[in-house]
Image (spheres, rainbow, N blue to C red):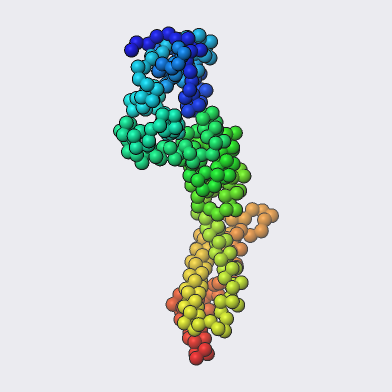
């Protein structure tokens, strides 16, 4: 059937609430209509009392109203209302509908027109599970979040990929995040990063993340800055010190008189291995610093500024010379000797226990 000009006031927007609002798209359509006129007709079916029910073309209709037009180019379909909806979904509307918009039409077909999900699936050529997932998507969102989506304040992608699974687990958390995004949207990438981290952490950290998602993302960006090898070494050394401090506090409890001898031996051997690794690294650092001094000369003036303390390298070398490098008069323990020492200690504990 050919398109015809129909008064806009005769067009009923029964399904307007099922379309996601997009003011920018309407502005672009209005600009195009100003230059070229309405190129694509609105799709409608015959209603009651000389009126028509719009099934597709709500943005075109909004653009015409924005321009102050009294009539719209409309193609009136001969199908019934439900058949027209199925036809538009099956053959494709003037634009691609989001999953939530499709879910809204499916819900209307079920509630208003009495279709089963299986019948909708058959008529659309899709599997019943796909149709069921579409409907679940809509019904999983709290009403206030759904309003944000349909108003365009929250993207359909954010709703389907983040808000729906979050709402199923914690509806209040979903509302808090949705309100943040409505005020200050995040890019798809940032929202995905946020939700990925949210799923991995505990309740206390989740609360802090929800309190200020933007601050949390800034902290992630700061962590993403590549560290120099010296900075990484320093952080790892600090972590090792923290671990050793915690282990030291547990020594009285772990190495109690009631400790099983076999387990004590295992722990002491593991401690010996750790100790030998530290001694080996001390020797390597001492050797490297001696090599640096031999290349720079005995004065080492190139590494200190006037009026400053000796360089960090010299301080480290002095510390190692005092505590970890006794010179040629005292031979360093090898890794194997250290392990043997700890094994002997473990054996002594075992003999005592016997």
What residue lies at 35% left-to-right and 17% top-to-bottom? 78
What residue lies at 49% left-to-right and 67% top-to-bottom? 281
Relative placement, left or right, of 318 versus 280 is right
Q: Position of residue 41 (x, y in %)?
A: 40, 14
Q: Position of residue 28 (x, y in %)?
A: 48, 18
Q: Position of residue 26 (x, y in %)?
A: 49, 20
- Looking at the rendered structure, the number of numbered marks drawn on it comes to 0
What residue lies at 61% left-to-right and 58% top-to-bottom? 311
Q: Position of residue 63 (x, y in %)?
A: 49, 16
Is 52 above or below relative to 154? above
Q: Which of these two is toward me, 23 or 121? A: 121
Q: Give the position of the N terminus as an image quadrant.
A: top left
Q: Which of these two is toward me, 274 or 182? A: 182
Q: Which of these two is toward me, 249 or 253? A: 253
Is 244 above or below relative to 9? below
Q: Note whether residue 350 is visible.
A: yes
Q: Note whether residue 348 is visible.
A: no
What residue lies at 48% left-to-right and 74% top-to-bottom? 270
């Amino acid at each position: 059937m050919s398109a015809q000009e129909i008064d806009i006031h005769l067009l009923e927007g029964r399904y307007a609430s099922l379309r996601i609002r997009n003011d920018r798209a309407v502005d672009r359509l209005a600009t195009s209509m100003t230059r070229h006129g309405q190129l694509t007709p609105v799709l409608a079916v015959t209603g009651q009392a000389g009126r028509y029910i719009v099934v597709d073309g709500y943005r075109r209709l909004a653009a015409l109203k924005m321009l102050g037009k009294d009539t719209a180019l409309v193609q009136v379909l001969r199908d019934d209302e439900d058949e027209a909806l199925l036809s538009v979904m099956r053959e494709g509307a003037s634009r691609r509908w989001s999953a939530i918009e499709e879910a809204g039409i499916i819900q209307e077909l079920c509630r208003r027109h009495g279709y089963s999900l299986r019948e909708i699936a058959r008529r659309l050529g899709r599997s019943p599970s796909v149709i069921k997932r579409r409907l679940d998507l809509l019904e999983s969102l709290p009403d206030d979040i759904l309003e944000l989506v349909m108003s365009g304040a929250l993207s359909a992608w954010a709703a389907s990929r983040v808000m729906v699974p979050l709402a199923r687990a914690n509806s209040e958390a979903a509302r808090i995040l949705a309100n943040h995004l409505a005020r200050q949207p995040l890019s798809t990438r940032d929202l995905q990063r946020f939700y990925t981290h949210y799923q991995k952490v505990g309740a206390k950290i989740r609360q802090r993340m929800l309190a200020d998602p933007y601050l949390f993302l800034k902290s992630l960006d700061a962590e993403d800055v590549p560290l120099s090898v010296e900075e990484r070494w320093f952080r790892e050394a600090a972590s090792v010190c923290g671990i050793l401090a915690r282990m030291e506090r547990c020594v009285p409890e772990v190495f109690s008189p009631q400790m099983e001898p076999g387990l004590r031996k295992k722990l002491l051997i593991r401690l010996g291995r750790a100790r030998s690794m530290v001694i080996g690294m001390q020797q390597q650092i001492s050797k490297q610093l001696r090599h640096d001094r031999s290349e720079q000369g005995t004065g080492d003036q190139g590494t200190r500024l006037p009026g400053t303390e000796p360089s960090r390298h010299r301080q480290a070398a002095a510390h190692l010379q005092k505590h970890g490098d006794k010179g040629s008069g005292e031979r360093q323990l090898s890794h194997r000797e250290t392990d043997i020492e700890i094994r002997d200690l473990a054996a002594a504990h075992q003999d005592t226990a016997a």
